[in-house]
Amino acid sequence: MTEQTHDRLLIIDFGSQVTQLIARRLRELDVYCEIHPYQNVSSDLIRDMAPKAVILSGGPDSVTREGSPRAPEALFEMGIPILGICYGQQVMMQQLGGLVEGGKISGGGGTAEFGRAFVTPEGQLDLLDDWFANGKEQVWMSHGDHVSRLAPGFEVYGTSPNAPYAITADNTRHFYAVQFHPEVHHTPKGAKLYENFVKLAGFSGDWTMGAYREEAVQRIREQVGDKKVICGLSGGVDSSVAAALIHEAIGDQLTCVFVDHGLLRKDEAQEVVGMFRDHMNLQVIHADEAELFLGELEGQSDPETKRKIIGRLFIDVFQKYANDIEGAAFLAQGTLYPDVIESVSFSGGPSVTIKSHHNVGGLPEKMGLKLVEPLRELFKDEVRALGRELGLPDHFIGRHPFPGPGLAIRCPGEITRAKLDILREADAVYIDQIRKHGLYDEIWQAFCAILPVRTVGVMGDGRTYDYACALRAVTSVDGMTADYYPFTHEFLGETATRIINEVPGINRVTYDITSKPPGTIEWE
Ligand code: XMP
């Protein structure tokens, strides 16, 4: 096994909605951390991971409830710094001999507190170095219960009007407990608390992309040996970075399959294949299967049916090409850390399928392939940083996400080649406008949808009867929620004029101002 050389921090997840943000803040400090749900934190896990410090997250439960989650007792005997946040603070107090009382929410008489609060200092603490700039600091509270008696060894270092124990610590053991959430945006100097915490815990900030790249390359070599790897290249950032990294590790033992379903954007197939095959010298099979996909989609207008057809054909096609690669033993996937966390999350039971997303799920078992997932430890922006490190061009790394079913879900109702051609042209003009106005990087995702309706217009002296299209642009952090982008009227007017003038087949342009929820980002 490759020896892991970097310092590690363990985050024990008690089910807070914002636990992932703790990990983000730490990674920004070049600290490697892992989130594990509290029920999975065994003594074996702790021994294998050998963390240099631990953070106990917030959570929805009440420590006053019998059977509510606890931290492993052994943790407090390890002699390493521990930071408890909100529920984590209360767990710590309760387990170390203090007292927690229920607030209104859990039926007790104490004061629940939600929202902004101001904490003022009480004495000196290394965790709070350079923290209280003006004698007080804004924090975000979200708690029903509260600590009513400190555990032995703890003292108060910060109070707020409703939280006399807002910041407490056992300075000798380096145990710190805060009532608020330093990881959220509404605690403006929260990042500084984490910086102080990892500093006092002795982290050297050794989690850099350069180090990660070397380690990942080594790990891939060890895992794969002299076997062959297949990678489904979609042109998206994740699969592209995974392919580039694996190629660096094992060169021509990697073959990529780019499934072209005929639902790609203008010039997309040539760009992706051209870059990977000609520019980066990867072995890429361009599976041009547009006829197959568009043939089976003919006459289909139900969104879920369309997705299912595409998903099924995608797997069939991928398998067909992959079967021709002799000696393949591994399938590469661009799984990211949020996918890994979600799959074991304390709070994440099976969620409702709003739209069926297609991927190559089930394929590895079916084909007897093992998985190579070199991005499993990374967040999306870290994947981008790794891509840059590997020499992928910036404009490629920064591309907006593009869904697996492609233009099919941007062409509500029945798909025809003619409509797809019009859509491709309109989308290209729209994106060109966004780039020309320097807005591309401010927007999370932007695209054009062709509507299943034709409208009357006048152009020159003639009457037109052509398609209407909708422009969509949203800001988002993860695609789970989104806001429409507030373009200026000038921008919208100029873009509409360009599309109508430059794209035959469209005579009306609308702008979609629906947020998510209640809308979704895509139209189907
Ligand atoms: P929605 O439309 O559900 O989209 O708000 C959220 C994000 O997911 C993308 N998306 C997909 N990605 N396969 C994918 O790979 C799919 O079937 C799919 N459907 C939506 C969408 O582009 C947006 O980024």
Image (tube, rainbow, N blue to C red):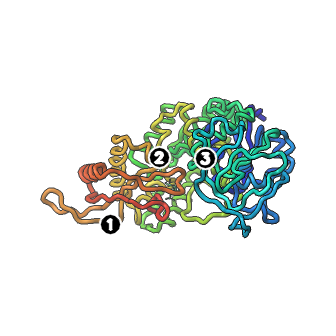
Q: Nearer the viewer, residue 409 or 34?
A: 34
- Marks 1 and 2: which is nearer the front? 2
**272 relative to 147 in the view: left or right:** left
Q: Residue 472 carries which label?
A: none
| Amino acid on which disc 3 is placed | Ala
Q: Which residue lies furthest to the left in this view?
A: 461
Relative vertical location of residue 210 with respect to residue 261 in this rendering, above or below: above
| x, y percent for residue 202 | 74, 32
Residue 17 in sight in this render? no
Mark 3 lies on residue? 322
- The residue shown at (51%, 34%) is 392
Residue 65 horizontal/vertical position (percent): 78, 65
Q: In which quarter of the image is residue 229?
A: top right
SS at badge 1: strand
Give me the C-alpha separation between circle 1 and circle 2. Answer: 27 Å
Residue type at the position of mark 1: Val
In the image, residue 54 lies at what x, y percent? 76, 44
Report the Cα–Cα distance between label 3 and label 2.
28 Å
Say which element carries label 3: helix
Q: In this view, does 468 lie above or below 252?
A: below
Point out residue 469 in the picture as x, y percentages from the top left corner: 33, 59
Q: Which mark is residue 453?
A: 1
Image quadrant occupied by the N terminus: top right
First in sequence: mark 1 vs mark 3: 3
Q: Does label 1 or label 2 sit earlier along the sequence?
A: 2
For the residue pair 224 and 473, the one nearer the viewer reads as 473
Residue labelled 2 has its Cβ within 8 Å of some atom of ligand 1: yes
Q: Label 2: which residue?
A: 400
Would you place residue 337 above or below residue 114 in this image? Answer: above
Quadrant assignment, res 172: top right
